[in-house]
Amino acid sequence: MRLSRKISGWLVFLVILHAIVIFAGFFAPYDPTEQDRKSPYLPPMRLHFVDAQGHFHARPFVYSWKVREGTFDQYDEDAARLVPLQFLVRGASHRLLGLLPSRLHLFGAENERIYLLGSDSYGRDQLSRFLYGGQVSLFAGLLGAGITVFLGLVVGSVAGYFGGWRDDLLMRISELFLALPWLYLLFALRAFVPLAVSPLQAFFLIIAVVGAVGWARPARLVRGVVLSAKERDFVRAARGFGATDGYLLRRHILPQASSVLLTQAAILVPQFVLAEMTLSFLGLGVPEPVPSWGNLLSTLQQYSVLVSYWWMYLPALLIVPFFLGYLGLGSGLQKSEEPEKMERNALGALRDGV
Amino acid sequence: MKSYTRRKLAGHPEEVRALDGVSFSIFRGTTLAIVGESGSGKSTLAFCLACLETPTTGNIWFEEKDIVKLAEKEKRAIRCQIQLIFQDPANSLNPRWKVLKILNEPLAVQGNLSHAEMTSRAHALLNQVGLPIEIEEKMPAELSGGQRQRVAIARALMLEPKLLILDEALSALDCSVQAQIANLLVELQESLGMTYLFISHDLAMAAHLADEIAVMSHGRIVEQGSPEEILKEPQSTVTLELLAAVPRMSFSHLQAPES
Amino acid sequence: MRYFLRRLRHAVFLLIGVSLLAFVFTALAPGNYFDEMRLNPQIAPETITALRTQYELDRPMPIRYAHWVISVLHGDLGFSFAYNSPVAPLLLVRARNTLLLTVTAMLLAWGIALPLGIWSAEHLGRLPDRLVSWGTAALLVIPDLALALGLLVLAVKSGRFPTGGMVSLNFESHSLPGKAYDLLLHMVLPIAALVLSVLPLLVRHVRAAMVEVLDAPFLLAAEGHGIPRRTLLYLYALPAAANPLISLFGFSIGTLLSGSLLIEVVMSWPGLGPFLLEAILARDLYVVIGGVLLSTLFLVGGNFLADLLLFWADPRIRTEMQA
């Protein structure tokens, strides 16, 4: 499949973002579950290049926070404690891709903890939690979208190609699933599983549920494509060459559906990530202490947190580039969906000569 | 005697009789034209003959065998010997495939030859239909209507079929292109000894190409005869209507092909 | 008339299907569920045994389903263990509140999306269209959760809007217009969040549908007759584009319902959302089922309305029916 420049642009962008998340161990300075009870709700530390005396430092640095006199949760920059950023430091051990043990981190500091996105009530570094949380949420989204699209493909092609009672039955069932507001269905399905599940169980539960809810729309789309592809003359011609059903499906009909499916997948991933976020935010998804983008934001349910600790909101904004990537990819794929718009070119005739 | 066909009717779920009493024969190396207005059942006839659909009753005799009664596997073999050229080449060529892939497909489905062998045969056929070999790298969207139809013809000939059914194969082309493709078809018939079934609503073109004409209306054949007979002494109202539809002043310059 | 009946039959079929699904879920969980109930000190053991017999756990499935359907049709949606009262009345109050939000959001969203989409399609490719496209894209990439929370933050900072609940504590003491104003004030944030979350989708589809129609020759002919631009757009082009838009209407109801679930929780609006959440956390199953059924009822009902709208808007459907 020839990729247009737009599509490859978005693809590269997404790959970079995902790489950062996949290698969260390297890019994140700390272990996301590492607590520092002495530093709850620290605001994000600002990067400086020029210090209080006006000296320029080539290496960026931050100031430690010190508690303001007379308060217990207001902080000021402590000009006396200058913490330079070090790159490629050795820090907490982690496993790259879950396999290779390593202690290398992109940046860090000698004796202090650097909180570029601030800390939460347990003193955990929000940046690290965001990066690790992305692993969970993005993976859930991708896997969920994959399952949904696959189910839709199977159902849609059976319904469209074989028609008859299979088509009727499958379409009726899909209408049923489309008739349910998805979040309600998600809630209902979640309700029937015990509340306290392990993070792994919760993860797969979410994926299964989200995949089960969303297959109806792709299935109908695939069915439409299959129905119209079935009637195309080149399919008839291939039958005329002695092709079997399997061949026709594999090599002619389903490839027509591929672009529709890819577009669907690109659009579905953010939706499923959002579904996981919603569930986890409400406490029904991935439980603590495993971070996910949803439960990162769940403390914001408390009014006091929302008002006083604004940086807890930042992860929500950091998600935007990811969604942007998928949206761009999806819309690029949509535009490329029609290589088959062939007009009878009189122009072509003049150009090439018949 | 090569192809010899006779058929009764084909039904659809709501009992629409697409074909109702059709019977004729085609002899090897000749061209039979079936002419009729839209909806007369011509395409259904083509699909039945090509073994892509099954008539509800009746028989189709091809080389002394009734292909209606065959098992699916044998039918597949028969399909290779009767090839269809469709009306709209924009539809009959997979828009995502390159021309070479399209041409090689018939042999690729059989699975017997190597890529090189298939490609050389494809080149030979491209030659025969008057297309340059470079065209194999292009996509159908880059070709003109006439070029696409030539590709379709070349593809149909890949399997060395005994019978070629042309279902309105010229109708979607511009007038001048029609003439060129028609001439190509005549050439091929002479050089390859092809048997044609030419289906059309264009009586004039049919008369130009065919040895025998059958006029269809509402699923049955209403008149049959040589081109001169049909043109000079049309028997049925349908034929008269079809004649009237031809935008020409006289037919004297039309000749029946040498038999 | 025949069309109406056909869509009605279709809607009923959907409801039956959903109820079957819902019932199967309850039937799958009982053992688990009653065991958990026994652990709950708030519920007396006698209640449990009574409930077991009441819910006929020893009878075969089809009979249970039949009885359950009958009780549902009588308005008995089961029993809430957390509140120790029948489910139906509890749900209905919350449902009313949710409907208040969703219907208003629906009207507002479409009220904005239609003119915006049409305007955008009218100026295809030029500045207005570009602005709208960028705006919708910007809204689409912000996760709904972030949007809702962001609006809350804004409310807090500006101090002008209440940050939760449906009415203020001193609601009863206001005069009628005062009450209305208070309610309205509380509605602003949730409605804004809902509308913003669904607006980009609607605008894009309206624009796409209009673009397709605006190419049509019949419009050119009408313009040649000197028909003014606004009339052209709204009375000629829009009805022609109505078909896909009405299906979108049905779909948007579902999206809004789901969206309201989350937003109600975030903004503490006392609708079905927080209530259902509570029920899940408290393992109050019949409330959950009832809530799902109710929301499906809204969705199916909304789609049914959309079908009727389509019938009225698209004469082709009418003639098809008569054929």
Image: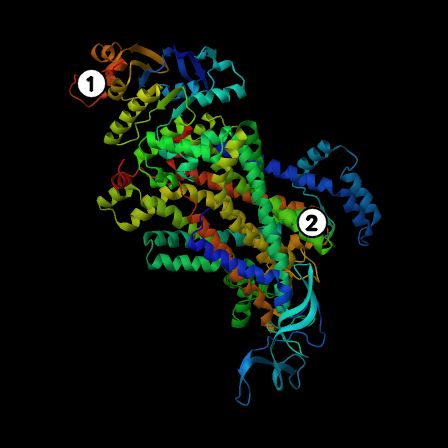
Residue C125 falls left or right of residue C8: left
Q: By what rule are the colours in the image chosen?
A: rainbow
Q: Is residue C154 above or below residue C24?
A: below
Residue B120 falls left or right of residue C15: left
Q: What is the residue that sits farthest to the bottom in this orientation?
A: A53
Q: What is the residue that sits farthest to the right in this orientation?
A: C45
Residue closer to the observer: C321 or B154:
B154
Are marks 2 and 1 in one subunit?
Answer: no
Between marks 2 and 1 in the image, the one whose residue lies nearer the viewer:
1
**Residue tagged by mark 2?**
A191
Residue closer to the observer: B191 or B67:
B191
The answer, for residue C323, to whether it is visible in the render is: no
Crowding at label 2, few (<14), some or many (≥20) Cα neighbours within 10 Å? Answer: many
Counting the numbered discs, the total is: 2
Q: Is residue B158 above or below residue B236?
A: below
Q: Is residue C3 above or below residue A150?
A: above
Residue C319, quarter of the rendered image: top left
Q: CA distance from mark 2 to mark 1?
A: 81 Å
Residue B141 falls left or right of residue A243: left
User: Which part of the image, by quadrant, shows the N terminus of chain C?
Assistant: top left
SS under mark 1: loop
Q: Are marks 2 and 1 in contact (CB under 8 Å)?
A: no
Residue A126 falls left or right of residue B97: right
Q: Position of residue A334 (x, y in %)?
A: 44, 48
Q: Position of residue C114 (x, y in %)?
A: 40, 51
Give the residue type that dot 2 points to.
Answer: Ala
Q: Position of residue C224 (x, y in %)?
A: 22, 44
Q: Is residue C295 above or below residue A32?
A: above
SS under mark 2: helix
The subunit carrying tag 2 is A
**Residue tagged by mark 1?**
B254
